[in-house]
Amino acid sequence: MESKQGRVFLVGAGPGDPALVTLKAVECLRHAEVIIYDYLANEELLEFAPREAEQIYVGKKAGSHAMSQEQINELLVEKGRNAVVVRLKGGDPFIFGRGGEEALVLEEAGIEFQVVPGVTSAIAVPAYAGIPLTHRGLSSSVAFVTGHEMEGKDSSAIHWDRLATGVGTLVFLMGVKNLEYIASQLVAFGRAAETPTAVIRWGTAAAQTTVTGTLGNIARVAKAAGIKPPAIIVVGEVVGLRRQLNWFEERPLFGKTIVVTRAREQASDFRTLLEESGARCLEFPTIEVGSPASWEPLDKAIGQLEDYDWMIFTSVNGVRFFFKRVEELGEDVRLLRGIRLGAIGPKTAAGLRERGLRIDLVPSEYRAEAVIEALAESEVRGKRFLLPRAAKAREILPEKLVEMGGLVDVVPAYETVRPPGRAGEVRSLLQGGDIACVTFTSSSTVENFGAMFPGDDLPTLVANAAIACIGPITAETASRHGLKVDIMPAEYTIDALAAEIVEYFGRE
C-alpha cells in the first residue's frame, strides 16, 4: 500500500496575543494532523486544531530546552513524510526563528513545505507599548538585531561601529540577559548614553510589562524591575513617544486576571468584552451544556405543539437546543404558528428573532418572576404553556403559572453538567492573590464552582477577588455560599456585567 504524502507548514504564531494570528495560520491549524509548537506560541491557538491532532511541545527557553534544534529537525522530517504538520513558531518563522534552517532540512529530505509568515514581535511589541518604530523627524530607519551576542567572543556578527550611529531605531530580540553589554557597546561606538531605551516583557499579552530609561541606565532600571525573558529592547528617540501613545497598558482592566466560569461555548462574547478592556481572562467553565438524557419528552411536545397557547424560553441554550431538535426531526419554525412566544432576556429574544419569529413577551427585568408579573391572570388561566429548558432549573416560573391556573409542561431541552476543570491552577492563583475577579452568570455556575473545590473554605479561597454576578438570583446563590457580591449590573445581561466590572475597577 502506497504511503500517504506529507507536508509541513512553517507557521508564524504571532507575538503572543492570539488575535494577531493570520487567517492563513488558522486555516493550516484546522487541517493539521500533527502540531509541533514552541514556547512562545500561544497555546490558545491549539484550539483551532482538530481534537485528534497530535500535539508535540518542543519549547526552548533560557536554561530549559524540551528538544534541541537537531532533534526538532529530525522530528519534522519524521512526521512530515506522511502527515500534514504545522510547525507553530512564535512571531515570524524567518525573523530569528530558525525557520530557514528547518526549511533547508525539509528541502534536503525532499519533503514539501510552505511558509506562513507571522506578525513578528519586533514590530508588534513596540506598537503595543506605544512606540512607533519610525516617526517623522525622529527616525526613518529601523534594524532588527539578535540579542544573543555575548561579550568576550573572538568575533561578532554584529557591526557595532556601524549599527550604533547608522540606524534610527534599534530593536534587539532575546537580549535581556545581555542588556548591559548591548548598551555599553552602543555607547562605546558613538550612541549617546542619553538615548531613550525601553525593555518590554511579554509584549502584546495581558502580562505585558514595560520599563524605560536611557542607554546609560536601562540595565539598572530593568534589573530593579525584575525584567526577565522573554523581552525585547528598543533603542531610539521614538521611545519618548510612549508618554503620549501608551494605549495598551492604559486600558481599565489591564493587569487584571478575571475568571470566566461560563460554559466554554458561551464564553467568547463575554471574554471578548473583558479582553477589549485589557483583562486577562482565565476560562474556568463550571458547566458544560449538552443534550438531555432522553429526547423523548421534548419530541412528544414537538409532536403536539398545536395544543399549546404559549411557549416560554428562559435561556438562549433552550432556544438553540429546541430548534436543533426540531430540525433533526425534519421540521421547521412553521410548527410554531399560532403559539405565543416569551423570552427571558435580550439574548434569548435575539435567538428567536434570528429564526424569523415575533416575540410576544420580553419582561423588562430578565428573570422568571418578571414573566409572572407581565402576564395577567386572565392570560394564564386555562392556557397551556410549554417550557423547554435545562433538565435542572429554578421551579419558580412553572409553579407560579400553575398557581395562576395555567397548565404547564416542563420538558428538558438540554442539560448542564460539571466538566473536568483546572481547579488546581485556579486555587493556586486565588491563594496567591493573582485573580482580581471571579464572574458568575447563573446560579449553576456558582454551585458548580463551589463543588470544584471540595474541602476548601470558599469565602476564604476567594477573599482577595471581587465577586461579580449577572443578577439577583445568581447573587443570592453566591451569598448562600458565603460569598460577598461586589459587582452586579442593573440590567442582567453579559454586556452590562462586563461594563459594571470595568466601572468597578475604574473606581478602585
Image (tube, rainbow, N blue to C red):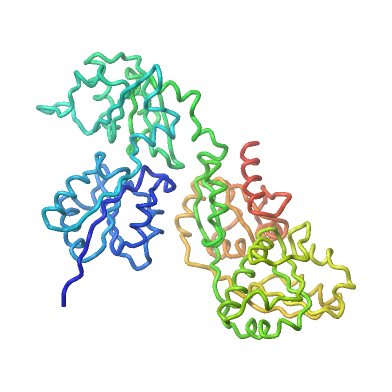
- Residue 285 appears left or right of 396: left
Say if residue 433 shows up in the picture.
no
Residue 44 falls in image quadrant: bottom left
Quarter containing the N terminus: bottom left
For the image, the number of numbered tags is 0
Classify residue 426 as left or right of residue 188. Answer: right
Q: Where is residue 68 in the image (x, y as percent from the top left)?
A: 18, 50
The answer to which image quadrant residue 388 occupies is: bottom right
Q: Nearer the viewer, residue 380 or 351?
A: 351
Q: Position of residue 145 (x, y in %)?
A: 25, 30
Q: Is residue 292 placed above or below 489 in the rendered structure?
A: below
The residue lying at 43 percent from left, 32 percent from top is 129
- Quadrant into which the C terminus falls: top right
> Residue at point 79% right, 62% down?
370
> Compared to 43, does 95 lie above or below?
above
Q: Where is residue 488 in the image (x, y as percent from the top left)?
A: 69, 50
**Picture quadrant where residue 406 is located:** bottom right
Q: Which residue occupies 79% across, 77% down?
A: 309
Q: Position of residue 360 (x, y in %)?
A: 78, 66
